[in-house]
Structures are given as C-alpha cells and as structure tokens.
Amino acid sequence: MNTQQFLQLAIDLARSNVKEKGGRPFGAVIVRNGEVVATGVNTVLKTKDPTDHAEMRAIREASRVLGSELLSDCEIYASGEPCPMCQGAIQRADLKAVYYATPKEVAMEAKVVPAGSNPNIPFQYVEMANGSEPFELWTKRKENTE
C-alpha cells in the first residue's frame, strides 16, 4: 500500500466512526514496513475522556502490539491534522512521519473542536521541598540498572 491508500484507510475509519458509532470524524493508522500495526478512532463522545483521540488510541495499540513505547520505525496516517496533544504523543513515541488528509481549519469550521478548548489556562510552577524527589529516585534506579 502507498501513502494515499493508508490515508484512505484512516478516512474510512473516520467515516465509519461518524456513520455507525456516532463518533467524531477522526481515524488513524500506524504502519511499520508497509504493514498496518494499529488503528484508532476518536471515542471522546462515547468515553467522555478528552484524551481518547484516534491518534492516541492508535499509538497505545501500536505500543502494546510492538512491546515498545518508541515507534521510531513507524509512520502515522490520520484523517485530520493531529491536535497539539496528539502531536506531543507522536513526538514522544518518536514516529518517523505523519501524514494527514484534512487540515485543522476544516475541523474548526465543522465545529469538531469543543467550545471548551482553552489555550489560556494558566500553568504555574510551585516550588516544593521534595518536588524533585521522584525524579531523583528515577535517576538512581536508572543508574543501578545500566
């Protein structure tokens, strides 16, 4: 299969998600060496989980199937442009390429992005005496296992 065919699969998943499951119009496909490893659809409306995006579900499934949190030898094909959360997950999983069939402007025009999305929520660092303790424990654990 080629890029267009994998994107078509993502579009088909999204279409089915809307028509048959009442979900949002997002589908994602993760591919490794030309083979589909995992797929996902947006289930936010069903699960009431704001992180249950197609890309997130596909990444979780691919990580489970491949037994690794890193998907460096995989690409992701999405029906819509991945949101910032999904982009972060894609970068964290180290996917080697992202292809999408619909730009975010189309999703915004279709009012798929919830009205509650607020980019102005303040994030505030609060210094705590033991705030870095879990990270120090992690570092020691890593040093002892390497």
Image (cartoon, helix red, strand yellow):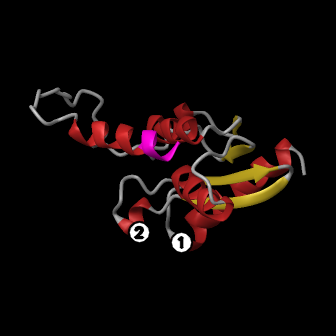
Check if residue 3 falls in the magenta segment: no
Residue 135 place in picture, x, y as percent: 30, 38
Residue located at (36% from left, 40% from top): 140
Asked if the residue at tag 1 contacts the one at tag 2, i.e. Cβ–Cβ closer than 8 Å, the answer is yes
Amino acid found under the numbered disc labelled 1:
Lys
The magenta-colored residue range is 142-146
Image-based side of 127 in relation to 63, left or right: left
| In front: label 2 or label 1 | 2
The single residue placed furthest to the front in the displayed view is 144
Residue 101 place in picture, x, y as percent: 69, 40
Residue 94 place in picture, x, y as percent: 62, 37
Residue 103 place in picture, x, y as percent: 60, 33
Image-based side of 30 in relation to 53, left or right: right
Q: What is the distance, in whole Å, between disc 2 and disc 1 at their CAs?
A: 9 Å
Residue located at (24% from left, 27% from top): 120
Q: Answer with mark 2 or mark 1, whichever residue precedes in sequence.
A: 1
Residue located at (40% from left, 63% from top): 45
Q: Which residue is mark 1?
A: 21
Q: Which mark is residue 46?
A: 2
Does residue 3 sit above or below 22 in this rendering?
above
Q: Answer whether residue 51 is visible to the viewer in this image.
A: yes
Does residue 142 sit above or below 48 in this rendering?
above
Amino acid found under the numbered disc labelled 2:
Lys
Does residue 47 sit above or below 117 in this rendering?
below
Q: Which mark is residue 92?
A: none
